[in-house]
Image (cartoon, rainbow, N blue to C red):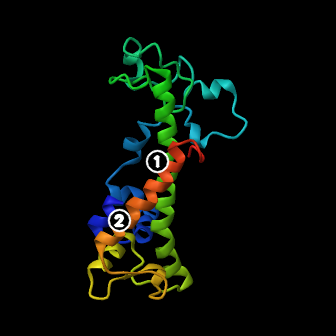
Amino acid sequence: YVQAIVTGEGPVENWASHIADPFAVNGLTSAYVTQFAPSPVAMFAASGRKAAELSAWYGPDRNKWLGPFSDASTPDYLTGEYPGDYGWDTAGLAADPTTFAAYREAELIHARWAMLGTLGCLTPELLAKYAGVQFGEPVWFKAGAQIFSEGGLNYFGNPSLIHAKSILAILACQVLLMGAVEAYRANQAGPAG
């Protein structure tokens, strides 16, 4: 999304140009990109993978952060049983199993919020571009600036639903609503993620 902000294009146009010719847009060559892909590349492997194919990602013989040079530097508590375990933990964040479980839960929560945020960024632009739905500004990084305009910000493009004129009021509402949701979750009354 940083590139979308820099180029001034919305995520859909930016994504379309990258899909059309990713190497020209990013200045990459196929030789440069493929040197980072382990063999076999797990995300393109067929379903029903055998244990030998997964050994590149799990277990003691998995791919590690320094390749063949990282055998002596992998901590004992990183055994390769979790996704993304490349044997690198210089800060010791996974040394305590209870703390590590809490970090994994927090990562799930943040990943789910990021997926919702992505959906919220792309949906207005896709609806405006392909379904003809009119929004005040469908591009996500330009939409928030409407609150500083003369008329304020109309949520969902409709002035009769929520018409925001004060950034401080929006901030207060966001803090209260998100604080209530997080308090509900943190007190084990709600789902963990």
Give how far apart the Cα atoms at labels 1 and 2 are: 21 Å
Amino acid type at mark 1: His
Q: Nearer the viewer, residue 7 or 84?
A: 84
Quadrant position of the N terminus in the picture = bottom left
Amino acid type at mark 2: Ala
**Which class describes the residues within 10 Å of circle 2: few (<14), some (14-19), or many (20+)?**
few
The residue tagged with tag 1: helix, strand or loop?
A: helix
Q: Nearer the viewer, residue 81 or 42?
A: 81
Q: Nearer the viewer, residue 34 or 62?
A: 62
| Picture residue at 59% right of the left edge, 24% below the top | 55
- Asked whether the viewer can see residue 45, the reply is yes
Disc 1 designates what residue? 110
x and y, in percent, of residue 38 in the image: 49, 32
| Picture residue at 52% right of the left edge, 38% below the top | 105
Disc 2 designates what residue? 172
Above or below for 64 versus 23: above
**Which class describes the residues within 10 Å of circle 1: few (<14), some (14-19), or many (20+)?**
few
Q: Quarter-wise, where is residue 96 in the image? A: top left
x and y, in percent, of residue 126 in the image: 51, 74
Q: Quarter-wise, where is residue 154 in the image? A: bottom left
N-terminal-most mark, 1 or 2: 1
Q: Nearer the viewer, residue 141 or 35?
A: 141
x and y, in percent, of residue 168 in the image: 29, 70
Above or below for 177 versus 50: below
